Amino acid sequence: MMTHELAASVVQLAVPLVDSNVPTGADFKDWVLVIAGNIFIAILVLRAIGHYFKREWGELFGHIAAGVLVGGLIYANNQTINVLKGFWGLLSGGN
């Protein structure tokens, strides 16, 4: 096999990767994140209600803070990732 034939076969293999009709799995990832996030938030809410009735205020506020963090990670994950990258850049001295 000649070099140009090998290059042509590699190009033919790479062309379907550029096609916009090929599924990437991004929708499935978003669906899994939303379902898992909703389940996790429901568990946090149930536990927070239990802490409220037991008058465990520190645990209650901890669950509220965790719920806000998880909500941010699930429903605004790209923005949250950008914020975390910005904080890491500040800590590490990067741009």
Image: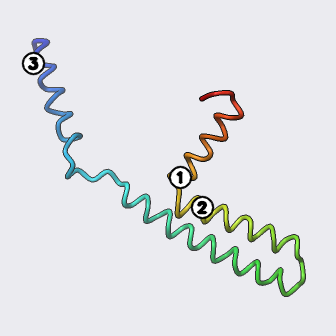
Q: Position of residue 40 (x, y in %)?
A: 62, 70
Q: Considering the image in quadrants, where does the N terminus appear?
A: top left
Secondary structure of the residue carrying numbered label 3 = helix
Q: As drawn, which residue projects farthest toward the top?
A: 2
Q: Position of residue 85 (x, y in %)?
A: 60, 40
Q: Residue at x 39, y 61 (%)?
A: 28
Q: Looking at the picture, which amino acid does disc 1 mark?
A: Gln
Q: State yes or no: discs 1 and 2 in contact (Cβ < 8 Å).
A: yes
Please, what secondary structure does the residue beneath circle 1 have? helix
In front of the other: 76 or 11: 76
Name the residue rendered at 21%, 49% in the picture: 20
Residue 72's disc is 2
Mark nearest the camera among 2 and 3 is 2
* Residue 46, image quadrant: bottom right
Would you name the residue on which mark 3 appears? 5
Q: Rate crowding at label 2 as few (under 14), some (14 to 19) or many (20 or more) other CA atoms within 10 Å.
A: some
The tag earlier along the polypeptide, 1 or 2, is: 2
The amino acid beneath tag 2 is Gly
Locate residue 53, reporting x and y percent: 84, 87
Label 3, label 1: how many angstroms apart (C-alpha)? 44 Å
Question: In the rendered image, which quarter contains the C terminus?
Answer: top right
Residue at image point 71% right, 34% down: 91
Q: Residue at x 18, y 26 (%)?
A: 10
Asked if labels 3 and 2 touch by Cβ distance under 8 angstroms, the answer is: no
Q: Residue 23 at x, y = what percent?
A: 27, 53
Residue carrying label 1: 79
Answer above or below: position of 10 versus 45.
above
